[in-house]
Amino acid sequence: MNILKQNFYQRTILSMLVLMVALVVPLGTALAGQAFPTIIPLPNGFSPEGIAIGKGHTFYAGSLANGAIYQGDLRTGNGSILVEGQDGRLAVGLKYDQRSQYLFVSGGPTGYAYVYDTRNGAEVGAYQLSVSGSFINDVIITRQAAYFTDSFQAVLYRLPLGPGGSLPDPSDIQTIPLSGDWQQVQGFNANGIEATPNGSTLIVVNSTLGALYRVAPATGVATEISLVGGDVGFGDGLLLRGKTLFVVQNQLNQVAAVELSKDLASGEITQVITDPNFDFPTTVASFGNALYVVNARFNVPPTPDTEYNIVRVSMK
């Protein structure tokens, strides 16, 4: 009798396990298929350029067409307009400050930098960095300041930040000339910008020369980073993760992975990331072990019906 009971219990438990597997496995597979899509669509006609990661798996993309800001979810691929566009505005490079939950936006040929509160989309700052002849391209945030590149002028712009990332008075804007090894040539010069975790060193790419520079944030003195394995021509957005610098090379439809030396004096291109879904990519952000690359599609006419998206690729 005890043996019969034992066999009955064993058969019952086994049947329950089989049923649980039958129920759970398809559900888990379906959820995995839905989460973190490879292609995240943006609104038609949006003309994106920059991307920034906010709280959790929230991302932001900016529009070259009218300066609108799109807020989306990397996990679901869904999103909506956070900041409505305005005539005469552009949104190029973006950066999110975790402390204040502010989004810093480069204004391109407007000469402005804009700051929005991501909690409600309200504009909390508009800073005129340059009067004319400039293209405010990208931005990086350290604990001390926000730094903006200018593709047409050999300068960086510095917005000092207070406790908790509080914003400065417009009179506190600093213009820092680039010097040292920096070369200013015809075309787009300073483009993407990054910073070491402690903010002691900035890294800037010159798109036309395909060169990387480490820059002293206080003085603007630039020292060229010696590259092995080629150059980073058409370099656009930068992303620093550990000692690996990811450089988007827009017209080449690729992202170069540069392994930097500890002192940032040199670097080696150890990998070139390509993807059939790349379509004139400009900027890159990361979440987990994935890169998120914006397709600006500068190679097609921008119309209200032009489709745009963000592509998710593995870092390795």
Image (cartoon, rainbow, N blue to C red):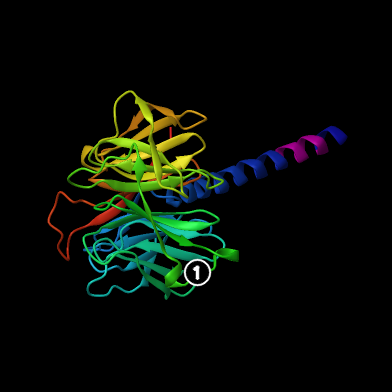
Residue ID at (34%, 64%): 129
For the residue carrying disc 1, how many other residues have a C-alpha within 10 Å: few (<14), some (14-19), or many (20+)? some
Is 265 on the left-hand or right-hand side of 11? left
* Residue 170 percent location from the top left of the image: 42, 71
Quarter assignment of residue 123: bottom left
What segment is highlighted magenta in the picture? 5-11
Residue at the spot x=40%, y=31% of the render? 258
Observer-nearest of 304 and 8: 304
The one nearer the camera, 132 or 103, is 132
Label 1: which secondary element? loop
Residue 212 at x, y = what percent? 35, 36
Name the one closer to the observer, 111 or 77: 111
Q: Is residue 1 magenta?
A: no
Side of 14 relative to 32 (left or right): right
Q: Residue at x 51, y 53 (%)?
A: 142
Is residue 288 shown to the viewer in this render?
yes
Query: x, y (%) of residue 16?
Result: 66, 45
Q: Is residue 9 magenta?
A: yes
Predominant secondary structure, magenta span:
helix
- Please give the count of numbered marks on the rendered protein: 1
Q: Which residue is mark 1?
A: 167
The quarter of the rendered structure image containing the N terminus is top right
> In the rendering, at what x and y percent does residue 54 appear?
48, 59
In the rendered image, the residue lying farthest to the right is 2
